[in-house]
Image: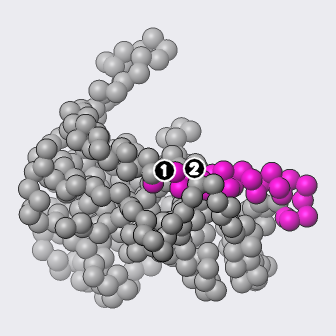
Amino acid sequence: MGGETIIPPTSTSEEEYSVDQDFPLPSLSSLNPTLLRDYLRMKAEDGKNESDRLFLEEFDKMGPQSSSPDFEAYHKRRQKVYKEVLQSYDQLRVRSKSLNEAKYKVLSYFPGTWFDNVGGKKLSDYDVPKTTSLLLIGPKGCGKSSLVNKISRVFEDDNFAPERAQISYNPSVGDGTYYLQGYMIPRGSASFCLYDSRGLADGTSENINMVQYWMNNGVRHGEPVIRKSDDSSLRRRMKFKPRELGWKFCRPQMVNFVIFVVDAVSVLKSIEGDGVEDLLCLQMISEVFKHPCISFKDDKPVVAITHGDLLSIADRVRARVYLGELLGIPPAKQIFDIPVCRKP
């Protein structure tokens, strides 16, 4: 097998840790609470945004207060979760030795391979797609395109193959991704197709409308993603880009699973910072993630946090635990830390 070798994170002398040490975990209700509550209450009192009022109520309920009789049990449970996530990095070092075996299982997969015979039904009773379509969604600059390149490199036979997805050097000034882009994983295969998408907008309603459209109507490679809030100059730029209409001849692919991508650095900034912007971004992430349109029955999307390689192991664990509590999913089993840097 060729491709990039995954090197699990290692600790330095400045970053020694033990699963038995007592990790101080900030309560969700203590993370910049005054700033966010005052901002949301001001908007909720205006009566213009029902989602702000609901998020405020949910934010107030996060975790028992220190005076609550359940506080000690709550604190111990969070400490246990923290240590489980920390142990997952040690487990990754062991599992990385079996990387080729895991790659073989993925490469040998085709839709229907892992079918469970439940309720007396046969595989022929289901409408099994020829290709399993995975949709990446997340805020602008969270690392969706970099994640496409990371996943693709794992299965490439040529370490010198060019990157497949265009990434932005500076997301604040670059165009980012404005078109749905499909990438067969591995290249030349028909088993998996990973779709890169435009970053989520600041307004939750536009995000929900956009994602619902994809989930109901399918995704098409090269389809432009235009919002009502886009200004006229952006619409003109997209109109004059070459081959804009090619997507209309592509057959829509139904989305089979969603991968939610979140920047670990932004999460940590929201935990430690004083700005409203990062907190509101997490509010948007929470509302979109919990919308039923991106879940399949009881199965919620997995979350991939990126740019964790810029943080210490302790901070990466804090980000995963915080997201797990915010989104209501187990951080050790459903939130995956995937560094996007390329190892030499």
Percent from the top left, x then y, of residue 190? Answer: 17, 41
Secondary structure at numbered mark 1: helix
Q: Based on the picture, tell me whether residue 204 belongs to the magenta stretch.
A: no
At 33% from the left and 88% from the top, the residue drawn is 173
**Up-down: is 277 above or below 148?**
below
Residue 101 is marked as none
As rendered, which of 171 and 50 lies closer to the eye? 171
What residue type is disc 1 on? Ser
* Residue 229 lies in quadrant: bottom left
**In this view of the protein, can residue 212 be seen by the observer?**
no
Quarter of the picture containing the N terminus is top left
As rendered, which of 190 and 62 lies closer to the eye? 62
- Give the residues drawn in magenta, as a range: 65-89
Q: Based on the picture, tell me whether residue 70 belongs to the magenta stretch.
A: yes
**279 relative to 231 in the view: left or right:** right
* Residue 225 lies in quadrant: bottom left
Crowding at mark 2 (Cα within 10 Å: few <14, some 14-19, many 20+)? some
Percent from the top left, x then y, of residue 68? Answer: 90, 59
**In this view of the protein, can residue 193 be seen by the observer?**
yes
Q: CA distance from mark 1 to mark 2?
A: 6 Å
- Kindly identify which residue carries mark 1: 88
Crowding at mark 1 (Cα within 10 Å: few <14, some 14-19, many 20+)? some
Percent from the top left, x then y, of residue 49? Answer: 68, 73
- Kindly identify which residue carries mark 2: 84
Secondary structure at numbered mark 2: helix
At 35% from the left and 69% from the top, the residue drawn is 143
